[in-house]
Image (tube, coloured by chain):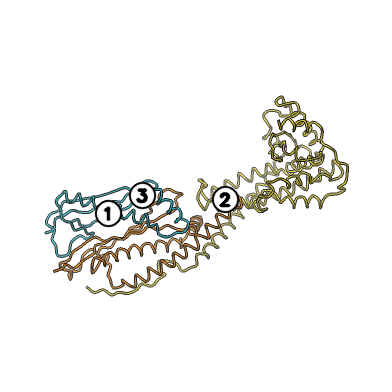
Chain colours: A orange, B yellow, C cyan
Amino acid sequence: MSWIEIAVFLVLLALGYFFGRYAERSHYRSILWREQESLGFPLLTLRTPPSSLARCDASLVAGNVVVSVDYFKRFLAALRALVGGRLKSYESLLDRARREAVLRMKEQAMDRGAVVVMGVRIETASISKGKGQAIGSIEVLAYGTAIVPSRG
Amino acid sequence: MDYEPKIIPEGINTSREHPLREFFLLVGGISLVVVLLVSVLAASADFLLGYIPVEKENQWFAQRHDSSAGDTGPAAEREVEAYLQQLSNRLRDPARPGFRFDLSLLENPAPNAFVLPGGHIVVTSGLLDAVESENGLAMVVAHEMAHQYHRHPLRSLGRGVVIALALVAISGADGSGLAQQFVGGTAVLTQLGYSREQEREADATGLELLLRQYGHSGGAVEFFAAVRELPLADDEPPVFLSTHPGIDERIDMLQAHARHNDGPITPLPAVIGEYLAQVEQ
Amino acid sequence: MIITNLETVPGRRIARHFGLVQGNTIRAKHVGRDIMAGLKNIFGGELRGYTELLAEARQEATDRMVAQAEALGANAILNVRFSTSSVTQGAAELYAYGTAVTLE
């Protein structure tokens, strides 16, 4: 162990902390704003369309996002894994990823002129297997069926 | 379809706690546990190993071939080894019988000496080059002998084994990953404190041995003064990352305890010069 | 071709069932994207390259599922599901499946 190793570790930790925190804040700001914007658009996990939508077109919409965790959070998680308990730093990461994926799906549905997305499903998968059992990057996929009123 | 758009309040799925709070709690808590655990284990290993009679240690770590017979190597090397052996015999503490010392030479330009369990002291050719007098060399040999008188080699070995086992138990056997590195690093830092303490102890006892033999402590700082002049000395790690105390601290300590610094200095025997000339070829 | 993850299409009746159709693809990420991902692993944040890669791959899995359905003569796939799994380090399998039907 030397000065250099310790310095590299501390620099990585600081970079992860400051950039990660900045990114998280601006991402939450964007999520909150977009959620507010599209508040009137309903997303349902129900699988039976309401009877009021008698004759409509249905099409699949999806939104996905791959997020990675910063060095600071990964270090925190590694320590947390020794003592156990809530991994608070990862909760917000996954929360952000899910809401982002849902928003992307919602935006796609709105672009297609849909009135509702039915049967919403959200799936989370860790896409970097191996690498020291650490959750490196996580993909969240949100998909559902956009119900678009038929023209004519 | 009745759809009522409403905003879900934040902070249900996530925590509002500042991440640095969790960071400091975890780092502080885990390093405290590791430092305590390592200290307790190290202290008990130290304590228990002190009860092992030195004769037993000598038996366990007896060398398979008798190096003092030295039928290999050139004549000058054998002569130097015999001289070192005889120097260590003169430095022995008569109050501590049962200790056995076995000195050997290692061809290496770095000025260094170390002691292995069982009293095997190894001196490098670079060290012979770095010291100017027998007194300077005697201080280094006495320092290594003092390590053995305090049973440091066996204790360090035992401590290392016990701590390695404890770390495997805490953080898993594979030794990779951030958590393992952190726990391992903390344990190493704790152990380094022990190592520096041992060096100070060996310096103090070594100086006593030197004083008993020569009646004065002239030449005691020769080796450290030579090491300080090395180009390496510039990128020496900071003291808390090192196994040894800082060179200046050691020179200060030796000078503070020194008495009659101005006694007669014994020169090195001529055979050392012959040996060094051979090594350089 | 109507693709939906619902069990019915509003206002349409199922005339014929063709059973399960599926599409899959396994993609590995390439080195350039991996280097970017390595940096992102320090700073955190979205890995846009991977997002696009997985979206493309999922589209390909869907296309293959649709090709199966077309071969059967269906005009809709109902109750579509996606799944993602990482099979080896650096590669992911994207899988889509559903029920091929003909709607009136």
Identified by mark 3, the residue type is: Ser
Mark 1–mark 3 Cα distance, whole angstroms, equals: 17 Å
Q: Nearer the viewer, mark 1 or mark 3?
A: 1
Badge 2 density bin: few <14, some 14–19, many ≥20, Cα 10 Å: many
Q: Name the amino acid type tagged 1.
A: Gln
The quadrant of the image that shows the C terminus of chain B is: top right
State if disc 3 and disc 2 touch (CB < 8 Å).
Answer: no
Left of A60 or right of it: where is B48?
right
Foreground: disc 2 or disc 3: 3
x and y percent of residue A71 in the render?
Answer: 49, 57
- Give me the residue at 40% from left, 59% from top: C46
* Residue designated by label 2: B184
* Residue on which disc 1 sits: C59
Element class at badge 2: helix
Where is mark 3, residue-wise?
C86
Q: Tell me the distance, in whole angstroms, between the alpha carbons under discs 1 and 2.
A: 46 Å
Nearer to me, B111 or B83: B111
Decide: is A86 above or below A32.
above
Along the line of sight, the residue nearer the viewer: B99 or B6: B6
Q: Earlier in the sequence, mark 1 or mark 3?
A: 1
Element marked by disc 1: helix
